[in-house]
Image: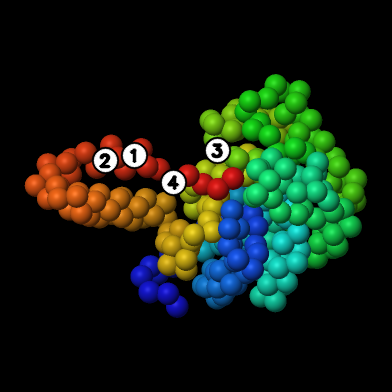
Amino acid sequence: MASGYQPQTKTKMVLSYHNIAEERGFYTLSEAQFEEQLHYLKGRYDVVSVPEYVDHIYRYGKSREGSVVITFDDGFKSYAEIALPLLDKMKMPSALFVCTGYLGRSNEWNEEQYRSPIMDEQQLKEVARNELVTIGAHTVYHPELARLQRTVIQFELGESKAYLENLLGRRIDYVAYPYGQMHLHVNQKVLSVARSLEYRGAFSTNYDITNSRKSLYKMNRVDIAAEDDLNEFILKLQPANHYYEEQRKRNRRSFRQTLRVFGHVAMVDCLEGMLPVIETSSSIDPAF
C-alpha cells in the first residue's frame, strides 16, 4: 500500500478514464498504472456499476458511501484490449461512453499526434455482451455542446442514443458530455435536452466525489490523469475539500521554494498574503 493518504469511507465517486496503453501519454495511462489503481480499489471500496450507482441516487437522494464507479470516455480500442481484461480479472464493473460518429476511426477531434484507434461496431458489440459493462452515449461527433443550437444538441444526444440502441438492441440510459465542464461546455439547455430524451442520468467532468438527485443530469466525476502516480490517485479518492487543501499546500511550498531559489528570501513572508489569489487562479484542469 502506498504511504500517505488513507481511504475515506465517505468516498462515493465516479472515476473518469480515457485511454490505456503500454506507455502513458496524452490522456493515456500506462497498463501498469491502471492495474495498480485497480488493485488499490479492490477490497477498500465497493466498485459498482453506473445503473447501481444511479438507482441508489433515485431511491435515497444521494450516492452511497464507500462506492466507486469506473467510467471510460470515447470508445478507444484499448478499453476492449487492455482495460476490460483487467477489470474482468478483478470482477469490477465499468461503463464505456462511445462517440458513435468515430466508430472504426480515431479521436479526430484531437490533433493527429494525439490520436488513437476507436473500436468498430463489431468490437463494440462484443464488449457490450459483457455483463459487467454498461454502454452509454458520448454524442456523435464530440462537440462542445453549450456552443450549439438546441436542434443540434438534440441531434448529438439523440442520434447517438438511437444509434447505439439500434446496434446493441437495448436501451441506452446514460450519457457523458464531451469536455464536460459546467457553464463552459455544458449549460442548462444541454441538461434540458438530456432530460427530454429520457436519459436516466448524465455525467459532466466537474470535480467532486459525490452526487445527489439534484445532479443527476450533471453528475460529477474525478478525472484520473496520465501523470497520477498511486499517491496522487489515493489523494483524489478523498473528499474534494481535502484534495484542494493538499493542492494549496503544494502551491505554497512551490511558491516559497521559487522565491528562495531566485534569492528573494525577504519577500517570502510579505508575499504569502498573495497565495489565496494565486491558488484560486491555478485550479485543476480536468482531462476531457
Q: Residue at x 14, y 50 (%)?
A: 263
> What amino acid is labelled 1 in the image?
Thr
Residue 41 versus residue 145: which sits nearer the camera?
145
Q: Secondary structure at mark 2?
A: helix
Q: Earlier in the sequence, mark 3 or mark 1?
A: 3
How far is disc 4 from disc 1 in space, using C-alphas?
A: 10 Å
Q: Secondary structure at mark 4?
A: loop
How far is disc 2 from disc 4 in space, using C-alphas?
A: 15 Å
Give the labeled residue for mark 1.
Answer: 280
Q: Earlier in the sequence, mark 2 or mark 3?
A: 3
Image quarter of the C terminus: top right
How far is disc 4 from disc 3 in space, using C-alphas?
A: 12 Å
Q: Position of residue 155 (x, y in %)?
A: 79, 30
Q: Residue at x 49, y 53 (%)?
A: 209
Q: Residue at x 86, y 42 (%)?
A: 163
Give the labeled residue for mark 3.
Answer: 181
Q: Secondary structure at mark 3?
A: loop
> What amino acid is labelled 4 in the image?
Ile
- Would residue 180 be visible to someone looking at this image? yes
CB atoms at circles 2 and 4 under 8 Å apart? no
Dot 4 alpha-carbon crowd within 10 angstroms: few under 14, some 14 to 19, many 20 or more: few
> What amino acid is labelled 2 in the image?
Pro
CB atoms at circles 1 and 2 under 8 Å apart? yes
Q: Earlier in the sequence, mark 2 or mark 4?
A: 2
Dot 1 alpha-carbon crowd within 10 angstroms: few under 14, some 14 to 19, many 20 or more: few
